Amino acid sequence: MNILFRADASIHIGSGHVMRCLVLAKILSNKGHKVTFATRPQKGDFVDYIQQQNIQIIELQRTSESTSPQNENDYNAWLQLPWLEDANDFIQKTGEVDLVIVDHYGINKEWETYVSQSLSCKIFVIDDLVREHCASLILDQTFGRQEHEYITANKETIILTGSQYSLLASQYSELRIQAEQKRSISSDCKVLVTMGAIDTPNVTLKVLQALSKIENINVTVLLSPRAPHYESVSLFCTNMPSITHIDFSEDVATLMLEHDVAIGAPGSTSWERACLGLPSIIIPIADNQAVIAENIANAGAAIKLAIEDIEPGFKAAFKLLTSNWLEFRLNNFKITDGLGAFRVVEQIENLEH
C-alpha cells in the first residue's frame, strides 16, 4: 500500500502524535509498504527527526506568522491554517495514495471527507478526543475507552479502542519479560522524570524541586532542548549531584527498564510505562490528559497529582508509591502487553481487501 501520514509536532502540540505515528510507519515500511510523512515546518517541529528515521517527508506550507492557541482546547490553532487550506495544500503535494493516516487534533471530519473524496483514498484516524469522524478505521488507545463512544459517518467503520492497541515500539514488548523478573525496588530508588518533549508549564522543574527534598534517590530527567524551559531545568540539575539530565534518548524503553518509578505526564508514555511495569506519579499538563490520568489511577497503576498539588502533596504521594511498589507494578503490567502496534497494522492491511 501507498500510505501517507498527516501529523505535526510543535511547541504547542508536543511530539507525541508524530512519535506514535513513527511506530506504525516503521512496522509498515518493514512489511514492504510505501510510507511518507506530510508535516508542517514550525517551531518545535520534528522534520529533521523524521528524516533521520529514513522516512520520506513532504513539507507542507510554512505559515508567515505562527498562530498561538488561545487556550488548551484551541486545536484549530494547532493546524496554523483553516482546515480547507491545509487540505488543499496536502492534496496538491500528494500523488496517488491508498491510505491517509491522520493524527492531529486540528483536523476535523470535514478535512477527512474532503481529502478522501479528492484523492479517492481511505482514511485512518488516530484520536482520543471522542469526536465524529469520516474514516474507514479509527483508533483510540486510551485505557478504558469503549467503541460505542465514537460516532462515524460510515456504519462500516472499524473502531479500535483501549490500551490493547497502544502504539508502542517493539523494544517495549521485547523488554517486558526482563521487566517482569524484577520484584523489588532498589535501595536508592531510581526515579525517571519525563514530562514530555515540550512541557510548556515547566512542571519538570517543580517535580525536580520536590524530589530534591527526598533522600536516598537517584533521579534521571529527560528534557529536550526544544522545551521552552530547558535552560532553567538544565541549570537546576547542574547544582544537584543526585540528578542526571539527558537531552534525548534513542532508547527510552531501556531507560525505563533501568528505573524503579517514574514521574510523568499521562500522554503516550503512559502505555510505555505500563508495558514495563513502571509505577508512576502522573501529572496532567493538558485537559485532554484528564481521562487517561483518571483511568490509570483508578486501575491502581499510578498516583494522580495536580500541578498545584506538587509542592504540598508530592512527598506523601512518593512515599505511597514506593511503599506499595510491587502492587502498583503488577497493576501496570495488566494495562498493555506492548503488542498493540502489530494488532493495528493487521487491521490496516485488512483495509486492502
Image (spheres, rainbow, N blue to C red):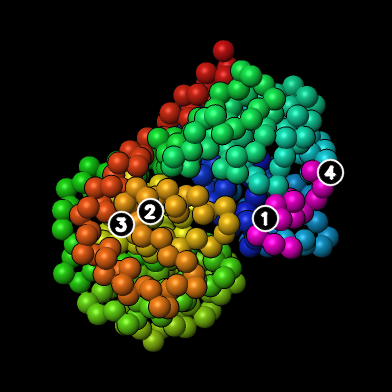
Dot 1 alpha-carbon crowd within 10 angstroms: few under 14, some 14 to 19, many 20 or more: some
Dot 4 alpha-carbon crowd within 10 angstroms: few under 14, some 14 to 19, many 20 or more: some
Q: Earlier in the sequence, mark 1 or mark 2?
A: 1
Specify whether 337 is left or right of 102. left
Q: Earlier in the sequence, mark 2 or mark 4?
A: 4
Residue 300 showing in the rendered view: yes
Type of amino acid under label 3: Pro
Q: Which dot marks residue 279?
A: 3
Which is nearer the eye, 223 or 139?
A: 139
Callout 2: helix, strand or loop? helix
x%, y% of residue 52? 54, 50
Task: Find the magenta span and give its range.
Answer: 70-83
Type of amino acid under label 2: Ala
Question: Dividing the picture into quarters, in which one does residue 227 lie?
Answer: bottom right
Specify whether 224 is left or right of 7. left
Q: Residue at left 17%, top 52%?
A: 182
Q: Residue at left 21%, top 64%?
A: 323
Q: Earlier in the sequence, mark 2 or mark 3?
A: 3
Specify whether 122 is left or right of 188. right
x%, y% of residue 224? 51, 66
How many marks on residues?
Answer: 4
Type of amino acid under label 1: Asn
Q: Magenta stretch: residue 73 in it?
A: yes
Marks 3 and 1 sit apart, C-alpha to C-alpha, by 29 Å
Type of amino acid under label 4: Glu
Q: Which dot marks residue 334?
A: none
Question: Dividing the picture into quarters, in which one does residue 333 lie?
Answer: top left
Marks 1 and 4 sit apart, C-alpha to C-alpha, by 21 Å
- According to the picture, the residue beneath numbered tag 4 turns out to be 85
- According to the picture, the residue beneath numbered tag 2 turns out to be 297
